[in-house]
Amino acid sequence: MKKINLNSELEELSPEELDYIEQALLSRAQTIAKIAYAPYSGFLVGAAVLLENGEVLQSSNQENVSYPVGTCAERLVLGYAGANYPTSAPVMMAIVAQRAGEEGWAEVSPCGMCRQAINESENRFGKPITLLILRANGNVLRIKGISELLPLKFDKLTN
Ligand code: THU
């Protein structure tokens, strides 16, 4: 028996350590999170994506009374990006969340399905997507590509 360890590298930055583009992308995600449609969970999520061409797109989560029909902010914005900008790679995504009625920001991390969707976008365009995740303490996790969050990922149908 051989043990295999899969390691991930995440960076945690204080707000002052972020560059202007990173701050702006987080700010877009915060603004859109505030108008999320999340009446069932009360968990308001915002995701903003920077495309290679400089365009910024954003979405919130959109829930449904039939719960599984609801869709996460990350998959909505990536789907829109892929449909409308099929030649421009998403290169960075900011993700933030807030509980309805609360002031501060909540801890959040993309769900498994969204990780797989981010992986698909990376493979489609051949570019890693840097993830910026706002923490409840105000710091930001910077993750250079979905491989760090999705070890042993399902990547291709054939060898
Ligand atoms: N949600 C997102 O939109 N993104 C995440 O990263 C975590 C979860 C949504 C799904 C659902 O509408 C609500 O948050 C609670 O799970």
Image (cartoon, helix red, strand yellow):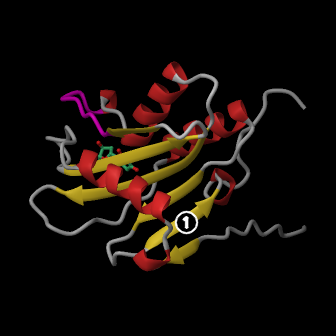
Q: Is residue 131 left or right of residue 32?
A: right
Of helix, strand and loop, which one carries label 1? strand
Q: Image height check: is 18 above or below 157?
A: below
Image position, residue 130 (x, y; %):
59, 55
Give the residue pinned by disc 1.
142
> What's the residue type where badge 1 is placed?
Arg
Image position, residue 113 (x, y; %):
51, 40
Image position, residue 122 (x, y; %):
67, 40
* Residue at the (58%, 36%) spot, across then down: 53
Q: Image height check: is 110 above or below 35?
A: below
* Location of residue 70 by image quarter: top left
Q: Image height check: is 38 above or below 88?
A: below
Q: Main secondary structure of the magenta part?
A: loop
Q: Quadrant of the C terminus?
A: top right
Q: Nearer the viewer, residue 48 or 150?
A: 48
Q: Which residues are magenta?
A: 60-67
Q: Is residue 141 left or right of residue 143?
A: left
Q: Image height check: is 98 above or below 86?
A: below
Q: Quadrant of the N terminus?
A: bottom right
* Residue at the (41%, 75%) spot, across then down: 15
Image position, residue 132 (x, y; %):
49, 60
Using a 10 Å C-alpha cutoff, classify the residue at mark 1 as few (fewer than 14 neighbours), some (14 to 19) or many (20 or more): many
Does 79 lie within the magenta span?
Answer: no
